[in-house]
Amino acid sequence: MESPPGYTRRSFLSGGARLPSPLRPPGATTAGLDRCSGCSACVEACPTGIVALSEGLPVVSFALGACTLCGACAAACPEPVFECGSPIAFLHVGAISEACLAKGGIACMTCRDACPQDAIRFRPRVGGPFTPEVLADACNGCGACVAPCPAGAIRMVGRHPEPVHA
Protein backbone atom coordinates (compact mmCIF):
# COMPACT_ATOMS: atom_id res chain seq x y z
CA MET A 1 0.00 0.00 0.00
CA GLU A 2 1.39 3.38 -0.98
CA SER A 3 1.68 6.12 1.65
CA PRO A 4 0.16 9.54 1.03
CA PRO A 5 2.67 12.07 -0.37
CA GLY A 6 4.94 13.42 2.37
CA TYR A 7 3.91 10.66 4.77
CA THR A 8 6.60 8.14 5.67
CA ARG A 9 7.21 5.79 8.57
CA ARG A 10 9.99 8.07 9.78
CA SER A 11 7.80 11.19 9.63
CA PHE A 12 5.03 9.37 11.49
CA LEU A 13 7.31 8.12 14.26
CA SER A 14 8.97 11.50 14.66
CA GLY A 15 5.61 13.28 14.67
CA GLY A 16 6.55 15.32 11.61
CA ALA A 17 3.68 14.37 9.32
CA ARG A 18 -0.03 13.83 9.56
CA LEU A 19 -2.38 11.89 7.37
CA PRO A 20 -4.27 14.18 5.01
CA SER A 21 -7.69 15.22 6.23
CA PRO A 22 -10.59 13.60 4.43
CA LEU A 23 -12.26 15.74 1.79
CA ARG A 24 -15.71 16.89 2.85
CA PRO A 25 -18.65 17.86 0.64
CA PRO A 26 -18.71 21.51 -0.42
CA GLY A 27 -20.20 23.79 2.20
CA ALA A 28 -19.77 21.33 5.09
CA THR A 29 -18.38 23.18 8.09
CA THR A 30 -16.35 21.88 11.01
CA ALA A 31 -19.05 23.02 13.42
CA GLY A 32 -21.70 21.42 11.23
CA LEU A 33 -19.86 18.10 11.12
CA ASP A 34 -20.05 18.00 14.92
CA ARG A 35 -23.85 17.94 14.49
CA CYS A 36 -23.93 15.32 11.71
CA SER A 37 -26.13 12.37 12.62
CA GLY A 38 -24.70 10.12 9.91
CA CYS A 39 -28.14 9.62 8.34
CA SER A 40 -26.61 9.35 4.81
CA ALA A 41 -29.18 11.68 3.22
CA CYS A 42 -26.30 13.53 1.54
CA VAL A 43 -24.96 10.24 0.14
CA GLU A 44 -28.31 9.33 -1.39
CA ALA A 45 -28.82 12.84 -2.80
CA CYS A 46 -25.47 13.16 -4.59
CA PRO A 47 -26.18 12.84 -8.34
CA THR A 48 -22.58 11.90 -9.18
CA GLY A 49 -22.19 9.34 -6.39
CA ILE A 50 -19.00 10.83 -4.95
CA VAL A 51 -20.28 11.34 -1.39
CA ALA A 52 -19.95 8.49 1.11
CA LEU A 53 -19.89 8.11 4.87
CA SER A 54 -16.63 7.41 6.66
CA GLU A 55 -16.72 7.02 10.43
CA GLY A 56 -20.25 8.43 10.34
CA LEU A 57 -19.30 11.65 8.52
CA PRO A 58 -19.66 12.61 4.85
CA VAL A 59 -16.54 12.41 2.67
CA VAL A 60 -15.94 13.00 -1.02
CA SER A 61 -14.02 10.63 -3.30
CA PHE A 62 -12.97 12.06 -6.63
CA ALA A 63 -11.81 8.62 -7.75
CA LEU A 64 -15.48 8.02 -8.52
CA GLY A 65 -16.12 11.24 -10.46
CA ALA A 66 -16.40 14.99 -10.11
CA CYS A 67 -18.55 17.31 -8.03
CA THR A 68 -20.94 19.55 -9.95
CA LEU A 69 -21.36 21.86 -6.93
CA CYS A 70 -25.11 21.41 -7.32
CA GLY A 71 -25.81 21.63 -3.58
CA ALA A 72 -28.02 18.50 -3.54
CA CYS A 73 -26.10 17.09 -0.56
CA ALA A 74 -26.71 20.27 1.44
CA ALA A 75 -30.37 20.47 0.41
CA ALA A 76 -31.02 16.88 1.52
CA CYS A 77 -29.28 17.22 4.88
CA PRO A 78 -31.71 17.43 7.83
CA GLU A 79 -28.97 18.71 10.16
CA PRO A 80 -27.16 22.08 10.11
CA VAL A 81 -24.02 20.52 8.60
CA PHE A 82 -23.76 22.80 5.58
CA GLU A 83 -23.48 26.57 5.22
CA CYS A 84 -26.54 28.20 3.67
CA GLY A 85 -26.58 28.79 -0.05
CA SER A 86 -25.02 26.96 -2.95
CA PRO A 87 -21.31 26.27 -2.69
CA ILE A 88 -19.11 28.14 -5.13
CA ALA A 89 -15.94 26.14 -4.60
CA PHE A 90 -14.20 23.71 -2.30
CA LEU A 91 -11.56 24.71 0.23
CA HIS A 92 -8.99 22.73 -1.75
CA VAL A 93 -7.46 22.82 -5.22
CA GLY A 94 -5.83 20.28 -7.48
CA ALA A 95 -2.10 19.61 -7.23
CA ILE A 96 -0.10 17.68 -9.80
CA SER A 97 2.72 15.48 -8.50
CA GLU A 98 5.96 14.42 -10.15
CA ALA A 99 4.26 11.15 -11.16
CA CYS A 100 2.58 13.15 -13.96
CA LEU A 101 3.28 11.63 -17.38
CA ALA A 102 3.98 15.04 -18.94
CA LYS A 103 6.49 15.85 -16.21
CA GLY A 104 8.15 12.51 -17.03
CA GLY A 105 8.49 13.33 -20.71
CA ILE A 106 5.34 11.64 -22.05
CA ALA A 107 2.84 13.85 -23.86
CA CYS A 108 -0.46 13.88 -21.96
CA MET A 109 -3.07 16.59 -21.48
CA THR A 110 -5.88 14.52 -20.00
CA CYS A 111 -6.26 16.71 -16.91
CA ARG A 112 -6.58 19.87 -19.01
CA ASP A 113 -9.19 18.25 -21.22
CA ALA A 114 -11.21 17.08 -18.18
CA CYS A 115 -11.18 20.41 -16.30
CA PRO A 116 -14.49 22.27 -16.74
CA GLN A 117 -12.97 25.46 -15.28
CA ASP A 118 -9.96 25.63 -17.64
CA ALA A 119 -7.86 25.81 -14.47
CA ILE A 120 -5.00 23.70 -15.85
CA ARG A 121 -2.64 25.19 -18.37
CA PHE A 122 0.42 23.70 -19.99
CA ARG A 123 3.71 25.56 -20.14
CA PRO A 124 6.15 24.99 -22.97
CA ARG A 125 9.38 23.23 -22.07
CA VAL A 126 12.55 22.79 -24.09
CA GLY A 127 13.19 19.20 -25.11
CA GLY A 128 9.94 17.69 -23.92
CA PRO A 129 6.17 17.93 -23.80
CA PHE A 130 4.44 20.87 -22.20
CA THR A 131 4.09 20.58 -18.40
CA PRO A 132 0.87 21.15 -16.44
CA GLU A 133 0.23 23.90 -13.94
CA VAL A 134 -2.93 24.36 -11.83
CA LEU A 135 -4.25 27.92 -11.71
CA ALA A 136 -5.44 28.02 -8.09
CA ASP A 137 -7.57 31.12 -8.66
CA ALA A 138 -9.53 29.35 -11.40
CA CYS A 139 -9.74 25.91 -9.75
CA ASN A 140 -12.99 25.30 -7.87
CA GLY A 141 -11.77 21.96 -6.46
CA CYS A 142 -14.43 19.88 -8.26
CA GLY A 143 -12.02 16.99 -8.83
CA ALA A 144 -12.88 16.47 -12.50
CA CYS A 145 -9.17 16.08 -13.23
CA VAL A 146 -8.50 13.35 -10.63
CA ALA A 147 -10.19 10.22 -12.00
CA PRO A 148 -9.17 10.66 -15.67
CA CYS A 149 -5.44 11.08 -14.87
CA PRO A 150 -3.80 7.90 -16.21
CA ALA A 151 -0.89 8.22 -13.77
CA GLY A 152 -2.95 9.01 -10.66
CA ALA A 153 -0.79 12.10 -10.27
CA ILE A 154 -3.46 14.56 -9.12
CA ARG A 155 -4.57 15.04 -5.53
CA MET A 156 -6.37 17.77 -3.68
CA VAL A 157 -4.55 20.11 -1.31
CA GLY A 158 -5.80 22.96 0.86
CA ARG A 159 -6.01 26.39 -0.67
CA HIS A 160 -3.15 28.62 0.34
CA PRO A 161 -4.37 32.03 1.39
CA GLU A 162 -2.81 34.97 -0.36
CA PRO A 163 -0.24 36.79 1.77
CA VAL A 164 -1.48 40.11 3.09
CA HIS A 165 0.54 43.06 1.87
CA ALA A 166 0.50 46.07 4.14
Image (spheres, grey):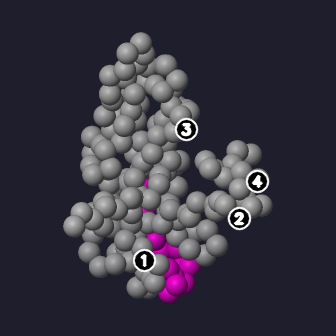
Is disc 1 placed on a helix, strand or loop? Answer: loop
- Please state the horizontal and vertical placement of residue 49, each as a whole percent of the image: 48, 57
User: Looking at the image, is mark 4 or mark 2 earlier in the sequence?
Assistant: 4
| Rendered image: mark on residue 152 | 3
User: Looking at the image, is mark 1 or mark 2 earlier in the sequence?
Assistant: 2
Q: CA distance from mark 4 to mark 1?
A: 32 Å
Is disc 3 placed on a helix, strand or loop? Answer: loop
User: Looking at the image, is mark 4 or mark 1 earlier in the sequence?
Assistant: 4
Q: Label 1, on which residue?
A: 29
- Give the residue type that dot 4 points to: Arg
- Please state the horizontal and vertical placement of residue 127, each as a whole percent of the image: 41, 12
Quarter of the image with the C terminus is bottom left
Residue 76 in sight: no
Neighbour class for label 3 at 10 Å: few (<14), some, many (≥20)?
A: some
Comparing labels 2 and 3, the label whose residue is closer to the camera: 2
Residue 45 in magenta stretch = yes
Q: Which residues are magenta?
A: 33-49
In this rendering, position of residue 68 left or right of residue 146: left
x 62%, y 50%: residue: 6
